[in-house]
Image: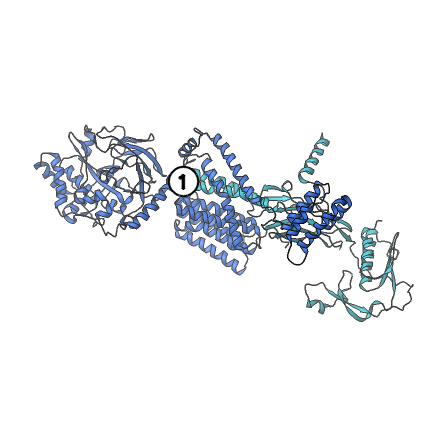
Chain colours: A blue, B cyan
Amino acid sequence: MSVAAPQALDRGAVPWLFATALIATAPHFFHQPEWLTGLALLIFGWGGWLWWRGLRLPGRWWLVALVVASCAGIVLQFRSLFGREAGLALLVVFTAMKLLELRSRRDAAVVTVLGYFLLLTHYFHSQSILTGAWLFAASLIVTATLIRLHGGPNSRLLPTLRYAALLTVQAVPFMLVLYLLFPRIGGPLWGLPQDAYNGRTGLSGSMSPGSIANLAQNGDIAFRARFESTPPSRGRLYWRGPVLEEFDGQTWKAMDALALARPDISGQDPPLRYAVTLEPHNQRWLLALDAPSTWPADSRLLANLTLLGNRPITQRQRIELTTTLDYRFNVQESGTTLQRALRLPAGRNPRAQALGQSWRETIVDPGSRVEQALTLFRTGNFVYTLTPPLLAGDTMDEFLFGTRRGFCEHYAAAFVVLMRAAGVPARVITGYQGGELNPLDGYLVVRQSDAHAWAEVWLAGQGWVRVDPTAAIAPTRIESGLAEAMPGSDALPALVALRQDWLRSLRFRWEALNNGWNQWILGYNPERQRELMGRLGLPDADWQTLAKWLFGACGLVLLLVSAWTLAHRPRLDPAQRLWRRASARLGRRGIDCPEWMPPLAVLARVEAGQPALAPAFRSFVEHYLACRYGPGPTNLKALRRALAALP
Amino acid sequence: MIQALRRFAGHVGRSLFRWQSDGDGLIVLNQRRVFILPTATGLLFALTLIVMLLGAINYTLALGHALVFLLAGLGLTGMVHTFRNLAWLRLSPGRAEPVFAGELAHFPLHLENDRPRPRLALEFGFSRQPVARCDLPANDRLTLSIPLAAEQRGWLMLPRLRLATCYPLGLFVAWSYPAPAMRCLVYPRPLTLPLPPASLATTAGARTGEGGQEDFAGLRARQPADSPRHVAWKASAREPDAPLLVKVFGGGAQTELWLEEQALPGTFDFEHRLSALTGWVLAADGAGLRYGLRLGEIEILPDAGPAHRQRCLEHLALARS
């Protein structure tokens, strides 16, 4: 018992607050500039030292100076105080600084609320299973801090943690109900800051020697696909990204605004239905298989067969598509497009251009010119490698006649240069090729390492025909994937290079788990919610219906939690329980004996009120007193018998 | 109209907050007696959750939704647990020891927890201002004393208590208004004056009296009216937590002292006189004298000892002019 200022913060609570602040801010240290991390750690260290030595907290001016300094630093770094990154940086610094002014319990409560808030911000960086689990544990610590804060100095470590766990467990049903039933709104609600989707990997709208090889060293998942029927063989899986038509001698670029013309496709086999779940790559292309026959309403198919969404893909997105793998495409092509597909920068790569021109003069059939180029790759001592030598100047000349070592983009680019010089309209296509079927969940996983570049030539009467020069030099790349095509290459990401079976199956398991997480937890959006409600017998549930169900379900959970929490009846001594039963019997016979009344007083009442009852009751009271207060072992049997003898 | 409203408010207040005394029996804080509302921290928490939800929607953070919903659930369970921290607590009043006006009266309150969960951070106060705080272990009982400044002599009634707690999460505050019928007798504030001259009516001096100035006879606890000159500083210093000790001397002649209202200066008002008489009682008792008290109608014959002292002080505490 103590009488203290009620709002004062006891010393023992401070380490908990440090733990909260550290747990909430630490994951940001990996994403923000080093000086901010340093500043935050410095403040933590300072506060910790003050606490350890029992020194006074710094005065107001120190804090003002710190705020001004850190704001200035953040403005210099991010050019703004607002926006996602700058705002986060401010939050981290302010949370750390709040530890320098922990005077009352209210300050401490602010730290914990800030801690909860900061936990949310980690999801900007990752929403994986591990992040989810880690933040669950972190919220447990923050909750324990709150409990410790209000429990005062008498609360101990383990019971506090256990209590926090109990509260969290009881909160989980609420979370589930709210997660399923809370009316979901598709974001964003307002314009996102410029920096909202920084740092996404994937294809870009241009290609230069080495760019695909760089991407291929990244094991991240680009997208997943699930076919309604058996997936086609690997060699037919060309996921089409941007089409690159403009060449400046070094870099290939996509044309803008190809716009209105629609491609003319004639499918020659039954359409294949499948769904693609794209990881966000912050670009608009949807990476459909050649050639799409139906696509979602908020996207359009360009004349060059690239499927383009109306908005950049900034969140994981599921798209339903159908496709024909055997098709003819633009047998009638516009002259401007063909002109563009023949253009080469004058004066660049003269040897390659000369070679192409010689084919044009000697070979009549354009199809044979294509064969000629592939034969050159097949027989000319070319090497397929993920780590090609750097090229400079006339890169194609240097590659074709010098190094002869290259990755898919080298072959595709060189092939298109030769074809254009030889008078065959040609262009470079970038995208992904292949993918790995996860036998556990039937999803085909396509990684950044499956990034690929190939070519397309236009032949009269056939339209645009896909030609993959890489297939000529390294057919295993197309049939079995990169890991098979270049065994033992250090440059490949470890996950992709895995060849041991057990590790592979472990990886399949993990990725299937991740995919389930993505599809069912992270992918729970307004559409999924509507679908689920339909399955629960509430089709077309509007938000009012949802709200009704939500309140009902929450009320039910609250009732259950309350029952669980409050239902602890006081644990009575068995003798005491028998006493209660006896007094209930007396009550029925008109003798009022409140709970607090001592047995002998009740006996006196009985003797006065109902003398007939007195002998039996006296014997009961004697046994009861012997059981409760007498020496020796308690004789409950005798007490029960005495109770039975009561009329 | 206003009358009716006032009656209605009074009725609501009585039925809701039980603005009547709970008597001197056991008080069980059943669910009808425990109220609960969010605290300022709770409101801040709710506001933060709303902001977090907006952020989660805007950036389509699925796990952000999950976190917000988990925290909302945590708030609700926290509410149930805060309620539980107070509900079905058993209180019974104890007996308060008399004090002098100007001192702190202590009202002992017996708390009993018959549940298997500890009740932490129980705060007792009169309005919003807590005056005592305690933690009650599971299946246990303890006695807490509620301090209250005793300003005036007479009976000091314990006002209605406000028992509040915001354990465990501090997002909600649960409170109750137990009003145990407890009172504490407050003696008048003692005024230190020199004792009046001993009465001439000395009885036969055969008895060996106490309270002289010559022979050291022992030590006893100091009372407010004892002269600082008699404090046994060295002996007191050995036990710093115990009350100060004063030396008691024996060997004085047995005298009988009448402490009379009339012996006081006429400028003193009634309360002043009571204070002065109280001081005299304490001084006389401290000196081990036999003394009697005359105050208006009241006459207490000379005697000595703690029971006599208490009787005199009670009469002074409850005297009416």
Q: Chain of mark 1?
A: A
- Residue type at the position of mark 1: Ile
Residue beneath the point at 19% across and 41% down: A412
Residue beneath the point at 59% across and 51% down: B118
The answer to whether any part of residue B204 appears in the image is: yes
Residue A153: x %, y % from top left: 57, 55
Label 1: which secondary element: helix
Q: Is residue B92 found left or right of A336 in the rendered image? A: right
| Extreme-left residue of the structure | A362
The answer to whether any part of residue B146 appears in the image is: no
Of the pair A371 and A89, the residue shown nearer to us: A371
Residue B248 position (above or below residue B126): below
| Extreme-bottom residue of the structure | B215
Residue A196: x %, y % from top left: 39, 41
Residue A187: x %, y % from top left: 41, 36
Residue A184: x %, y % from top left: 44, 35
Residue A351 position (above or below residue A270): below
- Quarter placement of the N terminus of chain A: bottom right
Residue B292 position (above or below residue A74): below
- Quarter placement of the C terminus of chain A: top right
Residue B273 position (above or below residue A564): below
Q: Is residue A325 found left or right of A298 in the rendered image? A: left
Residue indicated by mark 1 = A521
Q: How many marks?
A: 1
Q: Residues within 10 Å of mark 1 (few under 14, many from 20)?
A: some
Among the 4 quarters of the image, the one containing residue A525: top left
